[in-house]
Every structure is written in structure tokens, then in C-alpha cells.
Amino acid sequence: MSVPAVRQVAAPEAKSRRPAKSSLAAVEDAQATAGASPSPARILQERLESNLAVAAGAVEIQEKRWPLYAALTFWGGVSSLMWAAIIGCVWLLLRHI
């Protein structure tokens, strides 16, 4: 017997095998069974989309900020009051020494 004939006799199931699926058929099968068990990639995608929605809400809140001139005026006033308090406390401390 030749070597190919021996291989055919030793492996009769080789003839009965189905041809390999194309990648498109494999993708279609995967999509059909996707509902059966959630894949980690889909769970991650849903989590990222929900985080993106939360970030979009934060942007909407951020758009309600004060105008720049109002913010600068406010923080300038706060800073002036704090410096006045510091200088006043130092003056009182030096006066009572």
C-alpha cells in the first residue's frame, strides 16, 4: 500500500468532514448566538456608552458656568477679602505685642 492509501484507510472520517466555514458564516453564527450569552466586549461597550452619557451630562452642566468676567470679579473679591483678613490679623497681632 502506498502512504496516501494508508492515510485514507486509517482516517475514514476525513471524507465525511464538512468544509471549513468561511469567516462571514462564522460571524453570522456568532451574531445569532450573541443573545444566548453576553460577551465581555458587549458588556464593556455598554459600560463605556453609559460613561459617555454621564460625561455628556457633565458637559451640559459645565455649559451653565458663569461668564468669565463675572467669575474673575467674584474670585478677585474673595481674594481681596482674604488678603484684607490676613493683613488685619497681622496688624492686630503686631499692635498687641
Image (tube, helix red, strand yellow):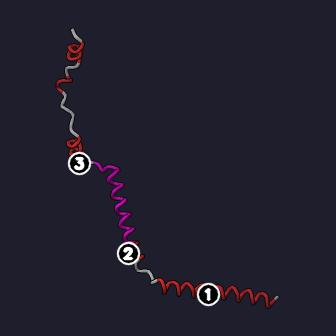
Q: Say which residue appears at 23% left-offset and 13% top-offset.
A: 6
Q: Amino acid at mark 1?
A: Ser
Q: Which residue sits at x=39%, y=72%? A: 59
Label 1: how many residues lie within 10 Å, few (<14), some (14-19) or many (20+)? few
Q: Residue at x 21, y 8 (%)?
A: 1
Instruction: Say which element carries label 3.
Output: helix
Q: Is residue 79 above or below residue 35?
A: below
Q: Earlier in the sequence, mark 1 or mark 2?
A: 2
Looking at the rendering, which quadrant does residue 53 occupy? bottom left
Q: Which residue is mark 1?
A: 80
Up the image or down, 79 lies above or below 44; here it is below
Name the amino acid, label 2.
Glu
Q: CA distance from mark 1 to mark 2?
A: 31 Å
Left or right of 56? Residue 89 is right
Q: CA distance from mark 1 to mark 3?
A: 64 Å
Does residue 34 show up magenta in the picture? no
In the rendered image, the residue lying farthest to the right is 97
Do tag 3 and tag 2 residues touch (Cβ < 8 Å)? no
Location of mark 2 (residue)? 60
- Residue 38, magenta (yes or no): yes
- In this view, the residue in front, 73 or 8, is 73
Disc sitting over residue 51 in the figure: none
- Tell which tag, 1 or 2, sits nearer the viewer: 1
Q: What amino acid type should be assigned to the residue bearing mark 3?
A: Gln
Q: Secondary structure at mark 2?
A: helix
* Magenta stretch in the rendered image: 37-57
Location of mark 3 (residue): 31
Give the residue drawn at x 58%, y 86%: 78
